[in-house]
Image (tube, rainbow, N blue to C red):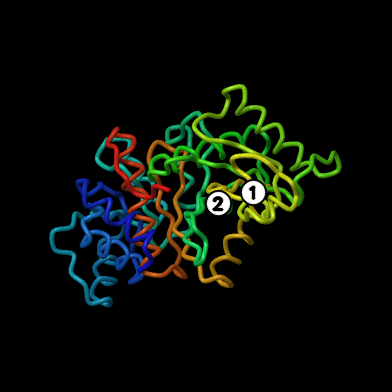
């Protein structure tokens, strides 16, 4: 296990298990994730889906569901609806995706009577990159395809709030583009500058912002020095806000598959954290995603926990 994810998981030992509604965990991978996080004391799951399929998946995986509440729902859409209902009723503090499509889970979340807040829902990867001194939060690489400036403001605030929930001592946000100068021909540079001015005016709070910044001068001090960029963020960013989903997805997957990084993921901006794991995720990444959700839930209960300090 890598040290940063170890620290995330260890921080959850200070907390009671977080009640998580798991929608449609009907295959071995999703059940394994749930049971491993439960065994680690991170979550207290409620499994929601077709009871016969859940039981068959547990039998095929050779695992026991003893002591775990299972609520019957006839199919994946119904499971998502019921899981969201458990949150609205106060019976769960987080949602977790089982073996259903992400859009099936998110549909009742963003519905009028779902779990929406005034914020835009967004996704954050919490990356542990070998050889890099700081953990990196990358957003948004999975939910918002081509966010507007207003949506990017929400994405940025969501990422800052997540960083605080994880114990970052100083949140340094780089608004990424292909260059570090404002160029009217490149809209992401103009939006980056606008986001920084919004932070100056108190419209985005809790972090230091700089942008536009190219990736190299956002995370590498030598690159920032060569470009003569002087700011508390350049070369030291620990939150990276990308121009759009395509850029973020390619950045996160490049770090994962070319640099050997781990990428735990979570959806924020709703009333509760939402754990979205992939079948391609490692065991450690799946448990770390549950740990992140537990720490976010604790922060919403105003329980301070030190997890990923600088």
Q: Is residue 243 above or below residue 119?
A: below
Residue at the spot 60% in from the left edge and 37% down from the top edge = 209
Residue 89 or residue 257, whichever sits in front: 257
* Crowd tier of the residue under label 1, counting other residues whose Cα lies within 10 Å: few below 14, some 14–19, many 20 or above: many
Is residue 174 shown to the viewer in this render?
A: yes
Q: Quadrant of residue 72?
A: bottom left
Q: Nearer the viewer, residue 271 or 71?
A: 271
Q: Which residue is mark 1?
A: 242
Instruction: Describe residue 114's horizontal placement relative to residue 223 as left or right.
Output: left
For the point 30% across and 60% down, the residue is 50
Position of 256 with respect to 272 (left or right) is: right
**Relative to residue 63, is residue 116 depicted above or below?**
above
Give percent across and percent down for residue 17: 22, 49
Q: Earlier in the sequence, mark 1 or mark 2?
A: 2
Q: Dot 2, how many residues are within 10 Å of its Cα: few (below 14), some (14-19), or many (20+)?
A: many
Image coords of residue 160 (percent x, y): 49, 39
SS at circle 1? loop
Circle 2 — which element?
strand
Q: What is the x, y in percent for residue 169?
A: 42, 41
The residue under label 2 is: 138
Q: Quadrant of the N terminus?
A: bottom left
Is label 1 in contact with label 2 (beta carbons under 8 Å)?
yes
- What residue is shown at x 44% (from left), y 38% (from top)? 270
């Amino acid at each position: 296990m890598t040290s940063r994810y170890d620290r995330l998981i260890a921080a959850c030992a200070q907390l009671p298990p977080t009640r998580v509604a798991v929608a449609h965990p009907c295959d071995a991978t999703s059940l394994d994730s749930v049971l491993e996080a439960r065994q680690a004391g991170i979550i207290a799951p409620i499994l929601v889906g077709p009871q016969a399929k859940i039981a068959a998946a547990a039998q095929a995986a050779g695992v026991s569901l003893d002591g775990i509440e299972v609520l019957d729902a006839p199919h994946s859409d119904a499971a998502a609806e019921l899981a969201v209902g458990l949150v609205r009723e106060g019976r769960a503090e987080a949602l977790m995706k089982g073996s259903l499509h992400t859009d099936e889970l998110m549909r009742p979340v963003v519905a009028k009577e779902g779990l929406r807040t005034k914020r835009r829902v967004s996704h954050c990867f919490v990356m542990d990159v070998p050889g890099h001194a700081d953990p990196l939060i990358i957003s948004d690489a999975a939910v918002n395809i081509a966010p507007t400036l207003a949506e990017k403001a929400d994405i940025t605030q969501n990422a800052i709030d997540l960083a605080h929930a994880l114990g970052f001592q100083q949140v340094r946000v780089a608004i990424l583009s292909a260059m570090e100068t404002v160029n009217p021909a490149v809209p992401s540079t103009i939006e980056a500058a606008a986001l920084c001015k919004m932070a100056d005016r108190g419209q985005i709070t809790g972090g230091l912002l700089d942008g536009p910044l190219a990736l190299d001068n956002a995370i590498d001090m030598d690159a920032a020095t060569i470009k003569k960029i002087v700011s508390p963020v350049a070369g030291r960013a620990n939150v990276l806000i990308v121009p759009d989903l395509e850029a973020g997805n390619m950045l996160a997957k490049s770090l994962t598959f070319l640099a050997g990084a781990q990428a735990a993921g979570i959806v924020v901006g709703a009333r509760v954290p939402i754990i979205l794991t992939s079948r391609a995720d490692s065991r450690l990444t799946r448990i770390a995603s549950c740990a992140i959700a537990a720490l976010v839930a604790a922060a919403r209960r105003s329980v301070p926990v030190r997890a990923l300090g600088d």
